[in-house]
Image: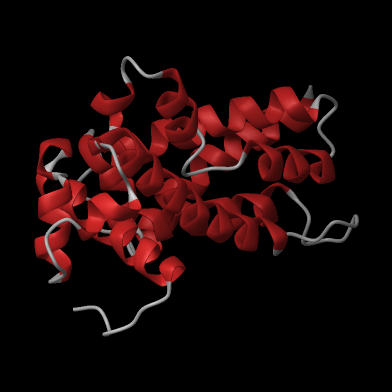
Amino acid sequence: MLSAAPSRQSRRTAICEAALDLVAEGGNHALTHQAVDKRLGIAQGSTSYYFRSRHLLVMGAITHLATLTRSAFTASAGSAPADDTVEHTVEGVADVIAAQLDTLLGARRRDVLARYALLPEAGHDEELRVALAQSLFSPEVAGNLMASFGATDSRAAASDLLSLLEGLLFDRLYGTRAELAAGTPESIEDLRRPVACWLTALRST
């Protein structure tokens, strides 16, 4: 339950957190203004005060999701050195990326499930589609990482990398490798291997 006199920003953040919890647990239909009010134990109509429509509530949740997950991606990508040191190799970059993916499958699993659950909301809404498409990974950060890695066309390489990461993430959640638990050496290696293969091919072109 929220404190008696929260700031507007902290109340909005709490609402967005509750929205992500609801859709991760029950799908997009579980997200209503009333459900958020009940989840937080706040007065009925409080969520509607901050987010007047469902569209604004969903956009608020997606924006909050992007803030959470892209900051984590930025932190992980930033651990790869920008200069040409021994760590900045195929293996070094693959390790950074694999660790971030494993975090999304483990500690940040809620965020990933929420993102997939919100996909139906974005099917006929271009604004939501664009926001949701960039909610887990930052094209800008990926581009910087690829530039520092030495990619000739860092923007194209970043787009290809994000497509690869999206596929790996989906496969580990719902595909043939969904039974492999996150947070284990086996999980990280399972993610690192295809990323390293792709980076090796990229560097050879």
Q: Is residue 48 above or below residue 1?
A: above
Query: Is residue 15 or residue 23 the one in the foreground?
Result: 15
Seen as rendered, the residue at the extreme bottom is 4
Q: Quadrant of the N terminus?
A: bottom left
How many badges with numbers are in the image? 0
Seen as rendered, the residue at the extreme top is 124
Query: Which residue is rendered at x = 21% and y = 57% of the image?
Result: 21
Left/right placement of residue 77 relative to residue 186 reads: right
Left/right placement of residue 169 relative to residue 118 reads: right
Query: Which residue is rendered at x = 29% and y = 29% of the image?
Result: 119
Q: Quadrant of residue 80?
A: bottom right
**Measured from the top left, where is residue 52 in percent x and y?**
30, 43
Seen as rendered, the residue at the extreme right is 84
**Measured from the top left, where is residue 7 in percent x and y?**
42, 75
Is residue 178 visible to the viewer in this orientation of the structure? Answer: yes
Is residue 179 visible to the viewer in this orientation of the structure? Answer: no
Query: Which residue is rendered at x = 29% and y = 60% of the image?
Result: 15
Q: Quadrant of the C terminus?
A: top right
Query: Is residue 189 or residue 129 the one in the foreground?
Result: 129
Coloring scheme used: secondary structure
Q: Is residue 144 above or below residue 163?
A: below
Query: Which residue is rendered at x = 81% and y = 32% of the image?
Result: 151
**Measured from the top left, where is residue 145 in percent x and y?**
74, 45
Left/right placement of residue 195 relative to residue 26 reads: right
Query: Is residue 199 or residue 141 the one in the foreground?
Result: 141
**Measured from the top left, where is residue 126 in percent x and y?**
44, 18
